[in-house]
Amino acid sequence: MPISENMTDKSIQADNPKTTLLLGAINMDLLVETERLARAGETFVCERLYTSGGGTARSQSVAAARFAGDAGGAVKMFGRVGDDAFGNELRGFMSEQGVDMGTVTTDAEIETGVAIIFIDPTGENFVHAIYGGNGKCGDVEADATIDAMSDAGVLLVQQEIPLECSIRAMVAARERGVPVVLDPAPAIPIDIVPDGFYASADILTPNVIEAEALSGVGISDVDSAEHAADKIRELHGCECVIVTMAGDGVFVASDVLRGHMPPFEVEAVATVAAGDAFAGVLGRALCEGNDLEDAIRLAMAAGALCVSRPGTQSAMPYRDEVLALVASSS
């Protein structure tokens, strides 16, 4: 499924791009590099501490805003942070990237969400999460999202805030003709998912682990990815399923587009933010009037550029970089 060879910045940009809406988690990651975890009652000296913005929706919003660039059309984030240093830092950074943070709730009664991540020499992660404001997202955030749908081109949601909040906004989006892109991350037990949750999404973008959890099908190649995608559509009523397979590309199953799309060839350095780059640019590209195939190729290019660099938010590519990679691969 090659992307159109004559794609240019002008051809993918709508005259008046609609707004990209994101509803989900915003948190600060505290990453600690250590030889080992401390024992009970022990003080163990670690090697390094650094911080990074976290939350799937937050990362996707940065990817969408960087791809938007000066093309027009707002990227609006909806969520909840505390009235604290981490919340202020996250607001400042995301605003600098072009994300509209005026729609994010500030709650003086609770802290901004935090993940404390211990990383051992093998790269193994030990994560302790404090949901903070993310866990308090509810009707206020859902209703604020709904109020912004009059000029929206897409709503992006995930599974890191209370699902009742997300489905309220998703159902409203479907009623208003706003496409919903759901990244089912992290994978969660199916029995805690509200009825109709996945069917409320127009596009579902699971990675291999998430697709296996949703389908019950083990994925080892393109054929098994196709089987899993079809099973997800059958079980959960999703119109379009895009299984992202890292270095093996994606498999798309929908009534309008079906098949394997091969990856862009890059040398992988860090894969942690690739899925967020993919989802953020996919949503933004749809807002600009791209058809599904072209939007997916742009999203794949963004994901490929992201894995070719170290870091998370710093690895998110800009619009000209994505277009250049697509053009060079046509």
Image: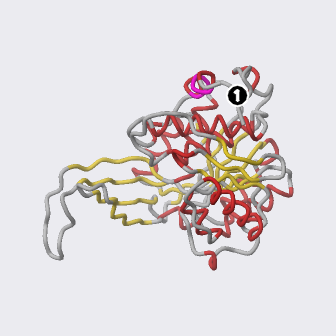
Image height check: is 44 above or below 194? Answer: above
The C terminus: image quadrant: top right
Residue 153: where, in percent of width, then height?
Answer: 77, 42
Image height check: is 290 above or below 329? Answer: below
* Part of the protein shown in magenta: 322-326
Say which residue appears at 63% left-offset and 79% top-offset: 191
Prevailing secondary structure class for the magenta stretch in the rendered image: helix
Residue 74, quarter of picture: top right
Q: Residue furthest bottom?
A: 191
The N terminus: image quadrant: top right
Please tell me which residue lies in front, 21 or 321. 321
Residue 171: where, in percent of width, then height?
Answer: 79, 62
Q: Is residue 196 magenta?
A: no
Residue 304: where, in percent of width, then height?
Answer: 52, 37
User: Dot 1: what SS?
Assistant: loop
Residue tagged 1: 72
- Its colouring scheme is secondary structure
Say which residue appears at 41% left-offset and 59% top-offset: 114
Give the left or right position of residue 168, taking residue 124 as reference.
Answer: right
Tag 1: residue type? Gly
Residue 64: where, in percent of width, then height?
Answer: 61, 38
Give the number of callouts.
1
Say which residue appears at 66% left-offset and 59% top-offset: 141
